[in-house]
Amino acid sequence: MIPLAQEIAIRVGDLSYAYPDGTVALSGVNLVVRRGESLGVLGPNGAGKSTLALHLNGILTGDGQVEIMGLPVNKKNMREIRGMVGLVFQDPDDQLFSPTVREDVAFGPLNQRLPPEQVAHAVSLALDWVGMEGSENRSPHHMSFGEKKRVSLATVLSMNPEILVLDEPVANLDPRGRRSFIELINSFKATKMVITHDLEMVRETCRRIVIMDEGRIAADGQAQAVLADSDLLYRHGLL
Amino acid sequence: MHHDFIDRYSRLESPVHALDPRAKALALFTLLVVCVTTPPGEWWAFCIYAAVVVIIATASGVPAGYLLSRVLVVVPFILVVAVFLPFMHKGGGFVDLGLFHVSRGGLVILWNVTVKSLIAVSCLILLSSTTPFSDLMHGFERLHVPRFFTVVPAFMYRYVFIIVDEAERMKRARDSRNYRGKWLWQAKAVGHMIASLFIRSHERAERVFLAMSARGFDGTFPRSREMIMRPADYAFIVIVAATAVAGRLVVLWK
């Protein structure tokens, strides 16, 4: 079943990438994600999951094609692409660099050159969404890890992305923080890609799963089917 | 972990806190320049400058003890630089202090250095204790201070605590393995810690930049908010600057 072009959110064609020191991170990745799909990318450490994510908005460019909502990822389309793909990094201290929450959540919309009223609106919507309204003037350093994670998500939601890419979204969160963050992820209805090696979390957030190992897609299928295949999971170091 | 911010008390509510950061910066900077260009013998002028500082400090509601402790931080530097001057200097005749004779010219220089640095530092501490750091940087930006001087401190303010935390964690991990730091050969461990702290910070800088790029950063920082100078802000600049200049001129005419 080949999806129609307008149904496709992400198309990655024969993508390969090696880091400057020669480490091969991706070798011939092919992946198509439909709009509205929730995709879990599972894989052991060093499988190339995060490298793949960095290609989706052109931070890294390897050999091969990447298209987002039909637009090829290249210099010319960069601003549009980065507005469409919201990347949430694993460590919230990497994501939150501003002295106050407001400035950080406004950073993306301001880079999109939105007028000030729209920026303010986007900031308050995003903070409401993640349940951090009223924290606009706080400094990220004084917040708990869970709060920082929520604000990191808000910094990307404020750009109103079509695709949300989350790198290890619940790593290091306590059970309660984890539960509420998973609910938050599930409340985002557009296309999602969750990068992780956390099987439980992926079961709760994704309907489709690909397994990556050694820079390749090793398996692709319905979440239930993939998670039930313990041989497969064991082979790729996930069990 | 708890850290003492340099802009502690900067979020109080007071007439001084409510002023535009630019107004405070300009007014206090004027006071500072007038103060350091005043000849050392003009006692009354210095009293007027100090009075202005005290009035602003009182109006700001920042605890006096806190301000004082911050200001006194500079005292050791003054001591190191200037305390020997009365003994070394050869001009202006001598003053008999019982045990020694000291140079009058040297004493004047010591007084001059001390009073000017105390007043100057008070101005800066007042500025940073009544203005949140980020607003201060925005204010400087509006005053066309080069970007480098506003962006670098803003990042430092954000990340210095993370680096301190990281160093603290490394230190704990090191001490848990029975490190005492008593012997010279153990200095090597400190060297390694500094190096790895540097590399970690460098890598973090890289990741922060990636996260910024992912949100469309193209090298120019967006302006996040408008600042408006109100009549009170202009009035503050004029009053402080005029008082300082008046103090200086009155003494000249005498």
Image: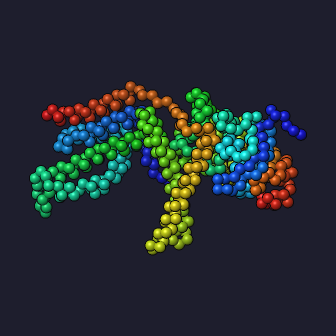
Q: What's the residue at 67%, 45% (across, down)? A: A60
Query: In the picture, which quadrant includes the C terminus of chain B?
Result: top left
Horizontally, residue B248 falls left or right of residue B157, namely: left
User: Which x, y percent locates residue B180?
Assistant: 48, 71
Looking at the image, the residue that sits furthest to the top is B231
Residue B13 location, quadrant: top left
Q: What's the residue at 29%, 44% (across, down)? A: B119
User: Which x, y percent locates residue B165?
Assistant: 52, 56
Picture layout, residue B69 above or below residue A101: below
Residue A4 location, quadrant: top right
Q: What's the residue at 25%, 33% (across, down)? A: B245
Count of picture labels: 0
Q: What's the residue at 48%, 71% (across, down)? A: B186
User: Between residues B58 and B112, which one lies in front from this camera angle?
Assistant: B112
Residue A96 location, quadrant: top right
Horizontally, residue B25 falls left or right of residue B151, namely: left
Residue A151 visible in rendering? no
User: Which x, y percent locates residue B38?
Assistant: 22, 40
